[in-house]
Image (tube, grey):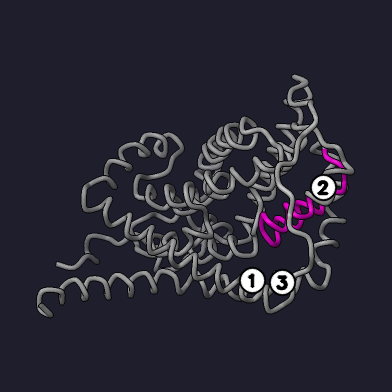
């Protein structure tokens, strides 16, 4: 009986070891960043950032107070931003269009301390990714606002569908919530990796590649980046971060493809969970889902062609870290 189950135990052990090796670099990024973000919140840094962003909000048709919402989202994630929004929404009386602009910007630029570190670990320089995501959020917010004003669309009053539980959270409760969140993330990672192995076993990974290959090809991204693109767009950069880093370090994806795939993910990712959260704030799917997808595809298409004009040396200097681990293995390097 022992001999019968031994192969199963060995495979299960190897699977957990692989999952742990994927999760470890992700947790090394997330745990320090979680602590840093908590400190920033406690010392009032998010409020200061919100004050700096207040004048910028007028450019995208939003009241200055919404700068605090975006600041909380960029630094600490969706739920802190949603809590601030719920506190301000009643007094501001925003239209559906204004909420759509705000939620679109939140979806493009959020949880940056964690997500930019994940991107940096995968190869792209965190500063260039940060500029592209914040700049992309502002640009899309500006374009969307002008389109909505031109057509007088989504001008009705928005309705908030979610209200946070009131009351401060003590440090012990906060710490326990973070531990539970990390454990849940590891469980989700196990499920993702198991699903990927099932897809590989039945040849469905190649089927997904065949679906996404034409789209990625039109954008200028190679088919080798299909896996990380699908992971990022569907699951998000935080949940899929460990697998994104692993795939990027495998040496099978060219640096430019890694970079452009991460840019696409930055502008459009986690399409299920995050989209549902933003619906609760009263925005429109047409703006923060459909419109954002079109914007992301056009932005990446244009960026691929612009950066094709610069040399690999300049590309690595400003956009991608030139490490040997990210280089595509040559046939001579492959084992015989």
The boundaries of the magenta stretch are: 62-85
Q: Which numbered circle lies on residue 3? A: none
Q: Position of residue 183 (x, y in %)?
A: 49, 70
Name the residue located 55 percent from the left edge and 44 percent from the top edge: 268
Q: Position of residue 280 (x, y in %)?
A: 67, 43
**Could you tell me which quadrant the C terminus lies in?**
bottom left
Identify the residue under disc 1.
Answer: 34
Residue extending farthest to the top is 151
User: Where 108 falls versus 43 (above or below)?
Assistant: above
Q: Within 10 angstroms of label 3, few (less than 14), some, or many (20 or more) residues?
A: some
**Could you tell me which quadrant the N terminus lies in?**
bottom left
User: Where 222 falls versus 153 (above or below)?
Assistant: below
Q: Secondary structure at mark 1?
A: helix
Q: Position of residue 41 (x, y in %)?
A: 77, 68
The question of residue 81 being in magenta is answered with yes
Identify the residue under disc 2.
Answer: 66
Occupied quadrant, residue 117: bottom right
Q: Is residue 80 left or right of residue 256?
A: right
**Rounded to the nearest whole Å, what is the CA distance between mark 3 and mark 1?**
6 Å
Q: Within 10 angstroms of label 2, few (less than 14), some, or many (20 or more) residues?
A: many
Q: Position of residue 273 (x, y in %)?
A: 55, 48
Q: Main secondary structure of the magenta part?
A: helix
Label pair 3/1, CB-CB below 8 angstroms: yes
Identify the residue under disc 3.
Answer: 38
Q: Nearer the viewer, residue 44 or 187?
A: 187
């Amino acid at each position: 009986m022992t001999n019968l189950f031994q192969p199963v135990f060995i495979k299960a052990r190897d699977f957990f070891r692989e999952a742990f090796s994927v999760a470890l670099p992700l947790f090394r990024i997330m745990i320090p960043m979680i602590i840093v973000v908590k400190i920033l919140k406690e010392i009032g840094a998010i409020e200061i950032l919100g004050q700096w962003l207040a004048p910028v909000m007028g450019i995208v048709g939003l009241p200055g107070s919404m700068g605090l919402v975006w600041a909380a989202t960029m630094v600490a994630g969706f739920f802190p931003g949603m809590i601030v929004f719920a506190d301000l929404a009643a007094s501001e009386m925003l239209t559906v269009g204004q909420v759509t602009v705000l939620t679109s910007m939140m979806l493009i630029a959020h949880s940056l301390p964690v997500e930019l570190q994940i991107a940096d670990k995968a190869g792209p320089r965190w500063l260039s990714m940060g500029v592209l995501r914040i700049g992309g959020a502002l640009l899309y917010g500006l374009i969307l606002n002008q389109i909505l004003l031109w057509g007088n669309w989504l001008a009705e009053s928005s309705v908030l569908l979610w209200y946070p539980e009131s009351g401060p959270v003590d440090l012990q409760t906060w710490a326990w919530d973070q531990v539970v969140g990390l454990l849940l993330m590891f469980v989700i990672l196990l499920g993702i990796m198991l699903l990927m192995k099932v897809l590989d076993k039945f040849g469905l990974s190649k089927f997904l590649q065949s679906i996404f290959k034409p789209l990625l090809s039109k954008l200028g991204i190679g088919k080798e980046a299909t896996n990380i693109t699908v992971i990022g767009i569907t699951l998000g950069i935080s949940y899929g971060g460990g697998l994104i880093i692993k795939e990027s370090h495998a040496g099978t994806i060219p640096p430019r493809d890694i970079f452009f795939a991460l840019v696409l993910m930055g502008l459009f990712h986690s399409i299920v969970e995050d989209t549902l959260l933003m619906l609760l704030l009263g925005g429109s799917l047409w703006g923060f889902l459909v419109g954002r997808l079109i914007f992301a595809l056009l932005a990446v298409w244009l960026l691929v062609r612009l950066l094709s004009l610069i040399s690999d040396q300049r590309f690595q200097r400003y956009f991608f870290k030139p490490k040997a681990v990210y280089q595509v293995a040559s046939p001579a390097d492959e084992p015989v």
